[in-house]
Image: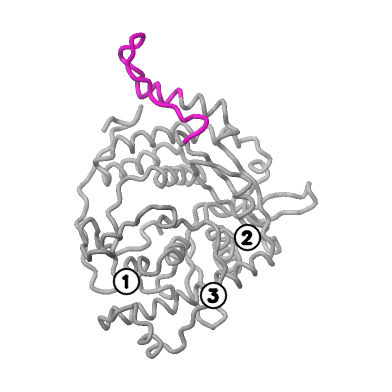
Amino acid sequence: MPAPQKRSALTGTKLKPPVTVERSVWRGPVEDGITQSLISRWLVCRERFRLLVIEGLSGVEGFNHRIEYGNMWHVCEEAYAQGIDHWQPLLDYAMRLAAHYRIDQEHVNKWYNVCLQQFPVYLDHWADNPEAVDRTPLLAEKHFSIDYKLPSGRSVRLRGKWDSVDLLDERAMGLGKRVWLQENKVKGDVDVNALHRQLKFDLQTMIYLVALHEARYTPELNAVIPKGSMIAGVRYNVIRRPLSGGKGSIVQHKPSKSNPQGETFESYMERLGAIIRENRGEFFYRWASEVSPSNLMKFRETFLNPVLENILDDYEWWDWCKMNNGNPFQGELRRNVFPTHTPRHYRYPFGVYNPMDEGGCTDVDAYLETGSEVGLERITDLFPEL
């Protein structure tokens, strides 16, 4: 792999072999907790979800630039929040990616350098924005693990990471000082109207707001969030990923008669950086969406509570099947063993990705068809990022 421009070369280490899982990888939403991404998987397919959380079966994924560019961006955001230069943490993360995805090192290098070009322009673009000037950071890249009580009396542990929680001085608008959750998203295509319309019932955004409301009176956050301040909603910060269609989707110039050597990779990245600087409004978006207590209550009552109750029931049944070599599709047996289990009606949220409905495939399709584990691995940790 070519070395990152003006940085040290990326090096790699051997990957550890997969570990066979004897018991459930996941100890359930009560003990280990549940994230919005796991809830999304459960909504898409309960059997594929079961294979992941009970059997520990997961595909061996290759480098996905859509996911990893977002992760690179979060690394830069975290470094900036800590007051340190972003390039070294970004390089460290790219080195780890290169070690893991050895055959994709050239792609890792490419997106590492794209991020090096785009992130400084992003900082400069928002530097003089009133929100940046009047903002007091309260939390940045903060992990949470919050007990959430359900109507049945049972509890689950909501887990995730807040990108940023800030106090904004809005007295000039007659609103005083209010607390805002900020979500940073990297997208290839940005439909501002659709995103703005969907935010009040977006899976991740609303779960993170629910968790923030639940946590604000804990000792840790009580010392951080000013007493009496209102949690106003979410500030949605969207970054459009370059080279994904539209402005800035350029290719490296190949050798020609006028330029037999072609365009160097360094010149290619510098040309991309110039396009981003000249068209900032097409790469950086930010808007605020107020979320009222009634919005949160509607989300809890029509989605979060019934779905978490259903997941609790499912885990209890799946784990019982695992321990007793049972078949999770035996509905009559389930009714005999767990007579209190009942399906609860709920409203489907925005922000759930379903590859099957979009004509795609999943990592365990071959296993579901043949029972073969070729191309799969047994994982032991569902929350490596937390």
Residue 136, position as x, y percentages in the image: 63, 49
Horizontal relation, residue 272 to residue 350: left or right: left
- Say which of 287 and 318 sits in front: 318
Against 207, is 323 above or below? below
The residue that disc 1 covers is 54
- Image quarter where the N terminus lies is top left
Mark 2 or 3, closer to the camera? 3
Amino acid on which disc 2 is placed: Ile
Q: Which mark is residue 306?
A: 3
**Which stretch is magenta?**
245-271
Q: Is residue 288 left or right of residue 370?
A: right
Q: Provide the secondary structure element on which disc 2 rests.
A: loop
**Residue shown at 38%/36% (left/top)?**
112
Q: Residue at x 39, y 36 (%)?
A: 111
- Mark 2 / mark 1, whichever is N-terminal: 1
* Helix, strand or loop at mark 1: helix
Indicate whether residue 255 is drawn in magenta.
yes
The residue wearing badge 2 is 225
- Classify residue 305 by image quadrant: bottom right
